[in-house]
Image (cartoon, grey):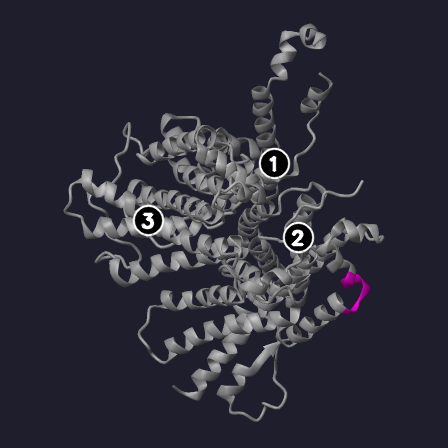
Amino acid sequence: MSLLALLGVLSSTIFSGTSLLYATLGEVVTERSGTVNLGLEGVLLISAATGYGVTVSTGNPFLGVLAAMLASGLSNLVFGYLVIIRRANQLASGLAVLFFGYGLSALIGKPFVGKLINSLPRYMVPGLGELPLRYTSLFKFDFLIYLVIPMTFFIWWLLYRTRWGLGLRAVGENAETAYASGRNPGMIKFQALFMGGLLAGLGAAHLSIAFTMNWAEYMTGGRGFIAIALVIFSKWHPIRAIAGVLVFSGAVAFQLLLQVSGVNVSPFLLDMIPFILTLTVLLVWGGTRKHSAPATLGRVYQGTE
Amino acid sequence: MTQRIESLPVKSILHHKFFQHALRYGLTILLALLLFAGILLITGNKPIPSYRDLFNATFGSAYGFSEVIVAMIPILLTALAVALPSRIGMINVGGEGQLYLGAIFATFAALAFKDLPGWLLLPIMGLLGILGGALWAFLPAFFRSIGLVNETITTLLMNMIAPKIAGLLVFGYWHSPRETNMTPNFVDAARLPTFFGTRIHLGIVFGLVLLVLFWFVMKKTRWGLEMRSIGGNVQAARRNGIAIAPYMIIVFCISGGIAGLAGMAQVSGFYGLLIPNFSPGYGYMGFLISWLAGGDPLGILMMAFVVSVILTGGNMLQITIGLPYAAINLLLAFTLFVVLAKPVLPILLKRKTA
């Protein structure tokens, strides 16, 4: 196997892992406030379609990224209306948002199928400019890729080093106590959902505008569900989410490597590896899981009147 | 007491539980249709002719109505697969995966034993379908029962794996000589019988019988009582000597088996072959139906019917006004939103004053 193939795999892993890390970060923020959004897949689809549509119409990929963020933020607010204001069951509302996303994204994306876009500009990784041309093309990344790791640390800082983050986590652990100490649980849950939506939007935008550079129905291919699994995998911690995404993307990369090196294994079998690996790690870490999940995750906050 | 005697008969009918239920369902659907009409207007379609098409495609003819029943079969079964474990407080989001495993196991039988007569082959396919779904449900149930991992997340992950197994088998081993993405057509002996010259197949009987059985077991047997007590208070049930872990595993496996049977019915009764990715989310739809109905058997039947009308009508809209098929998910989602948001309807409020 050539070095080029190896680096190619590495490069495509970075591209596909970025959207996943953004989505996982978003779900970490919402779940820390005690809300689990099972409809993340649908939100990502709406966001990817909107971002792509705006990029096609305006010719400006940065506007597309903004539109994608706004779209997923708003979709999460719809979900928030159901589970916070109307106090509906979170799992059922999440699945409703999933079908909402399937439907709305198909409608939004339909006029833009097959259209070409200006994708996000890519910049060379500093210090690699000396490499031969065929290598350099593999190490040109867009700003969303460069931003993802700093963003992870920023989210960690927000959650663990600011009053806002403290309040958010307090609401996730015990909304009544948070209310008693003068916070507004409903408002904080909404803020967490919107914030999570913005992050998911970055991921979806990266997927449709920077990585695949097209729109297709159901294009997220289960990324939303994978992100939800990775949140548990990373024990609701933003920094550990990097590790989770690395394990998952590593498994994807391994699968690509096998294919590149000509090992005759069915691609379907290889596609299973990341999920089986995630499942295994969940089982191995399962014993200590209880101590890290937000205590009121998934429960309906009945308000304090 | 005096109030009840004085109230007018019309009024008492209005406030009867059944009428209130029917009204609630009716208004829910009306609101959802209004919301979807907004979407139709935005996309440049005329809502009223579109809805006339939708109505004609479902209630307008015997054939249309039969198609609604056909669409109802898999989601009726997957909804049962969610309702059953929910009685002991377990959440089965894995109907989708269990459905695939059932379909895969049944397909194996259909291809391997195609020389057997139908009266023997079909039961084998059914049993293998149930076995496949039950196996897929066993792992999450086992890990939950020993307190390792929550079944919600494991079933979700296993949903992602199951269609890939179908892809692996179909593309790798089972595909027909001409097409690589599907198996050859099943022999006639491997097809569930259909009724009245329509596409309604025996699967509907599976669904209805299991629905009645579910009601009977829950209401009339000791098992039902024990299961309801586990769902009500695990601690109290344990102190009363009910073995929780075996119940969890057995109930979850049975529910997986029901979803597996849905998969078998779908490949044997509907398609007559196996295609990878044949399910447009039947497992998730089942979850929502069961949840909307609160796990109540009659409610499951009604909600499954409503969802099938939407799906069947949506098929027609795709043809007549060129909406992408996925767009009908919006009508489904609006129905769900309206139910989840529980809007305060004036006519239902009067009940309190009566």
Q: Quick check: can you spot residue B95? A: yes
Tell me the amino acid under the disc marked 1.
Val
For disc 1, the marked residue is B339
Q: Quadrant of residue B62?
A: top left
Q: Nearer the viewer, residue A83 or B317?
A: A83
Mark 3 chain: B
Q: Is residue A213 left or right of residue B127?
A: right
In percent of width and height, residue B121 lies at 21, 43
User: In front: B40, or A21?
Assistant: A21
Q: Amino acid at mark 2?
A: Asn
Chain holding disc 1: B
Which mark is drawn over residue A76? 2
Residue A164 lies in the magenta stretch = yes
Residue at (64% x, 62% y) in the render: A291
User: Cα distance, mark 2 to mark 3?
Assistant: 39 Å
Report the span colored magenta.
A161-166
Q: Which residue is pictured at 46% across the width and 55% down the height?
A: B140
Q: Which residue is mark 3?
A: B131
Task: Tell me which secondary structure the magenta stretch mostly adopts.
Answer: helix
Residue at x 60% of width, y 22% of height: B20
* Chain under numbered label 2: A
- Seen in the picture, residue B142 relative to A3 is either above or below; the reply is above
Pinpoint residue B286: horizontal percent, then vertical percent. 47, 42
Q: Are marks 3 and 1 on the same chain?
A: yes
Q: Earlier in the sequence, mark 3 or mark 1?
A: 3
Q: Secondary structure at mark 3?
A: helix
Q: Is residue B6 left or right of residue A162?
A: left
Q: Nearer the viewer, residue B135 or A107?
A: B135
